[in-house]
Structures are given as C-alpha cells and as structure tokens.
Amino acid sequence: MTEQKHTVGTYRYRILALVFMATTINYFDRSIIGVMAPTLQKLFDWSNKDYALIMVSFKIAYGIGLLFMGSIIDRFGTKTGYTLSIVIWSIFGMLHAAIRPAFSLIGFITARFGLGIGESGNFPAAIKTVALTLLQVSVLF
C-alpha cells in the first residue's frame, strides 16, 4: 500500500489574515465616531442627547443584527454571508460622508443603524470561517 501524503498550503494563513483585517476595519468603523465626537458635535450642533441617540441606534442595530445575521450566513454560506455583511457596512460607512447639516441627526442615526446591522455579521462569519478552515486542515491529517 502506498501512503498518501497531504501537504497543507498557506491558504489558511491568508484566510486568517483577511478575517483579521476585516475585523480590524470593523472595530475602526465602530470607534471612529467616539474619537470625532467633539468635532462632530460642534460641526453639526448636536447636544449630548443627540449624540447619545446616534450611539444607541448603532447598539440597537448591532443587537438586532446578531439575532439574524448568523442564520443568513448559515443559509447562504460563509463567503456570501460575509461578503453581504461587508457590503452593507461599507455602504453605510460611506453614507456618513454624504450627510449634510440639515439632516445630520436623522442621517447619522440612519447611517449608524445600517452600520450596526452590517457589522453584526462580522463575528458569526469570522468564527465560522476560522472553524471551517481548521476543520479542512484537520481532515488532511
């Protein structure tokens, strides 16, 4: 009998690097408004209550998104689900730049809500990606 030898390539490290970068961008998008808060409050004339509403809209959307993004990722697959999540959070992330002072409060609430929905898919997809990558590697051994 001939013993088959399987080699494991470096693709898993590339996948993990991509997941790491996406998660880093996720955290950057999430936290940048806190860094820019004093400037944005002056620019758009927000009160502390207005700023709190914007922050709460993200947190509510993130919580809601966590309830259904995992099932979307399971239903459509990790690649498609993760891509959908990244596309949603990218669109709403870019939407922040289009907001004008006249609609700043409702605009930022909407943009942060959409960002929360999109970003909520990051961890279910990242965890499933890592699990599937490790599973494929362990099957070879």
Image: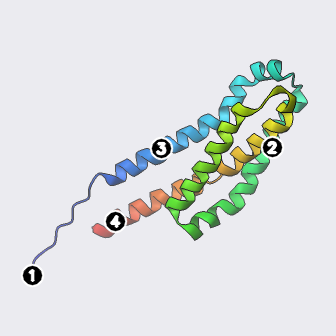
Kind of residue at disc 3: Phe
Tag 3, which secondary structure? Answer: helix
- How far apart in space, not on screen, are marks 4 and 2 (Cα)? 41 Å
Tag 1, which secondary structure? Answer: loop
Q: Position of residue 68 (x, y in %)?
A: 69, 63
Nearer to the camera, 125 or 105:
105
Q: Position of 23 compared to 30: left or right?
A: left
In primary-sequence order, the first of circles 3 and 1 is: 1
Q: Position of residue 112 (x, y in %)?
A: 74, 41
- How far apart in space, not on screen, are marks 3 and 2 (Cα)? 26 Å
In primary-sequence order, the first of circles 4 and 3 is: 3
Mark 1 sits on what residue?
1
Mark 3 sits on what residue?
20
Tell me which residue sits at (72%, 47%) in the image. Answer: 114
Nearer to the camera, 24 or 131:
24
Mark 3 residue crowding within 10 angstroms, few (<14) / some (14–19) / many (20+): few
In primary-sequence order, the first of circles 4 and 2 is: 2
Q: Position of residue 12 (x, y in %)?
A: 36, 54
Tell me which residue sits at (46%, 61%) in the image. Answer: 131
Q: Position of residue 9 (x, y in %)?
A: 26, 55
In primary-sequence order, the first of circles 4 and 1 is: 1
Against 5, residue 89 (above or below) is above
Q: Quadrant of the C terminus?
A: bottom left
Mark 2 sits on what residue?
57
Tell me which residue sits at (69%, 31%) in the image. Answer: 97
Mark 1 residue crowding within 10 angstroms, few (<14) / some (14–19) / many (20+): few
The label shown at residue 128 is none
The label shown at residue 138 is 4
